[in-house]
Amino acid sequence: MLIKSFPAGPWATNCYLVANEANSECVIIDPGFESLSGIKRIAEQFGLHPVATLLTHGHMDHVWSVVPLCSQHNIPAYLHTDDEWMITEPEKAYSKSGWQEIVNMSGGTPDYKPKDLKLLKENKTLDLAGIKFKSHHAPGHTEGSTVFETGNHLFSGDVLFNRGIGRTDLPGGNASAMDNTLANVILKFPDVMSVYPGHGPSTTIQDERTSNPYLRHLV
């Protein structure tokens, strides 16, 4: 499997391009702040053709470029239904000052809702670019946070980081839901699973099970 990534924007949000091999179709995961140029660079380098985008959750640093990306390639985006409000009414997901900063960075009111938005309601398997992605609802960081599994690879968004987890004090966050997700979703994956988070370096379930301070009390 071919997995390429780059950190996008001031929040260094990891944007992933996932394909079976070079010169084939690919899936984009979390197209963040002004990520189109990075996506284009990697796609051209490896001969990749985007056919869909997966959104791990609705925060703007993960969905910033989803509308132009989907329009440019005429592709759908997948998002859990519990985070739909974050892209249809994004101003409700931030403080007044935070939203104004986002508007200023966008040069106007941003649009995060692609024309072809496919909402995930239950855990399911998506067959995209010849790859089977299993979606797992993983609330805590946001209500609709989702991790995507394919083979021994897990794209964890802002649920699980290398030695950390996503914050739960933002709108839609819930600390008890996060604990439940960590115990009953994340820790159920095998130790050999590689983890590709929304920010920071990759890791493995084994490393996080033994070294992540937020998981130790749940093991």
Image (spheres, rainbow, N blue to C red):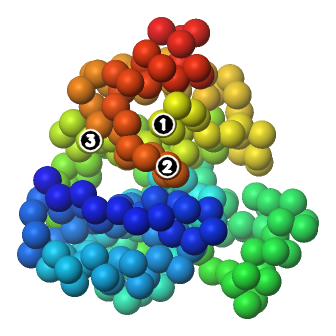
- Dot 3, crowdedness within 10 Å: few (<14), some or many (≥20)? some
The answer to whether marks 2 and 1 mark residues whose Cβ atoms lie closer than 8 Å is yes
**Mark 1: which amino acid?**
Asn
Which quadrant holds residue 152? Answer: top left
Which of the 4 image quarters holds residue 23?
bottom left
Question: In percent of the image, x 75 and y 75: which residue is there?
Answer: 102
Which residue is under mark 2?
200
* Amino acid type indicated by mark 2: Gly
Q: Position of residue 139 (x, y in %)?
A: 57, 36
Figure label count: 3
Residue name at image x 43 percent, y 15 percent: 210
Residues at discs 1 and 3 in contact (Cβ within 8 Å): no
Residue lying at 87% horizontally and 60% vertically, measured from the top left: 95
Q: Badge 1: how crowded within 10 Å, few (<14), some, or many (20+)?
A: some
Provide the residue designation for mark 1: 162
Left-right relation of 179 to 171: left
